[in-house]
Amino acid sequence: MSVIQTILKEVETVISQVEEGQLETLASELHQAKRIFIIGEGRSGLMAKSFAMRLMHLGATVYVVGETITPSIEQGDLLVAVSGSGTTKSVVWTSEKTQSIGCSVMAVTTNPESPLAAASTHILHVPAATKYRRENELQTIQPLGSLFDQSVHILFDTICLLFGKLNEVDHSQAFGRHSNLE
């Protein structure tokens, strides 16, 4: 098997363990939120920012935590917190703070027993390997958290497809929100 085929098989193994009904529920939660806030660090943060951009294209009011134009979070808002390990301190702290304000938190993590999961109202369990290579994690040929990041990207795009349908946004409407300053 080629390296590419092995990577694709690894991603398929992870994705196949996530129920599509759960993704539909998460898309519905995002659709019902007044505003959506996104947080993640490192490559997980890049996947989170990609998700935020796509949600914006689909008509969501969305902010990335830590950016200079991000307002205060308020009741009715939802935080999407991405951390493969579920232990990234800034992501966990932000989730705890968000819950203390009375907002929902959607954790995206490999570890449903993590501090991040404990500080969340919804959990998207992504059963991939992380950089820590814990005992129960999936085996991978890839370094660090690559398998998690790849899987999260596909799952986020699936959620966006479902969100777009709920929001009744088609390709031309999404394209109309795409940057024209490129």
Image (cartoon, rainbow, N blue to C red):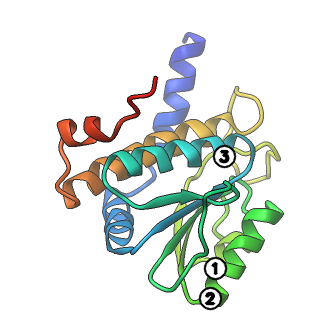
Query: Is disc 1 surrounded by few (<14), some (14 to 19) or many (20+) residues within 10 Å?
Result: many
Kindly identify the amino acid type of the residue bearing the numbered disc 3. Answer: Ser
Circles 1 and 2, Cβ within 8 Å, touching? The answer is yes
Kindly identify the amino acid type of the residue bearing the numbered disc 2. Answer: Ile
- Residue drawn at (44%, 27%) of the image: 181
Classify mark 2: helix, strand or loop: helix
Classify mark 3: helix, strand or loop: helix
- Choose top left, top right, bottom left or bottom right for residue 115: bottom right
- As drawn, 59 above or below 170: below
Q: Is residue 172 left or right of residue 142?
A: left
- As drawn, 43 above or below 91: above
Query: Is disc 3 surrounded by few (<14), some (14 to 19) or many (20+) residues within 10 Å?
Result: many
Kindly identify the amino acid type of the residue bearing the numbered disc 1. Answer: Thr
Residue 162 appearing in the image = yes
- As drawn, 74 above or below 49: below
- Residue drawn at (52%, 35%) of the image: 11
Name the residue carrying label 2.
Answer: 101
Classify mark 1: helix, strand or loop: helix
- As drawn, 117 above or below 7: below
Name the residue carrying label 1.
Answer: 98
Q: Which tag is nearer the camera, tag 2 or tag 3?
A: 2
Name the residue carrying label 3.
Answer: 44
* Label 1, label 3: how far apart the Cα atoms are: 19 Å
- Residue drawn at (44%, 82%) of the image: 76
* Label 1, label 2: how far apart the Cα atoms are: 5 Å
Disc with the residue nearer the chain's start (2 vs 3): 3
Q: Which sits in the foreground, 149 or 15? A: 149
Query: Is disc 2 surrounded by few (<14), some (14 to 19) or many (20+) residues within 10 Å?
Result: few
Residue 133 place in picture, x, y as percent: 79, 45
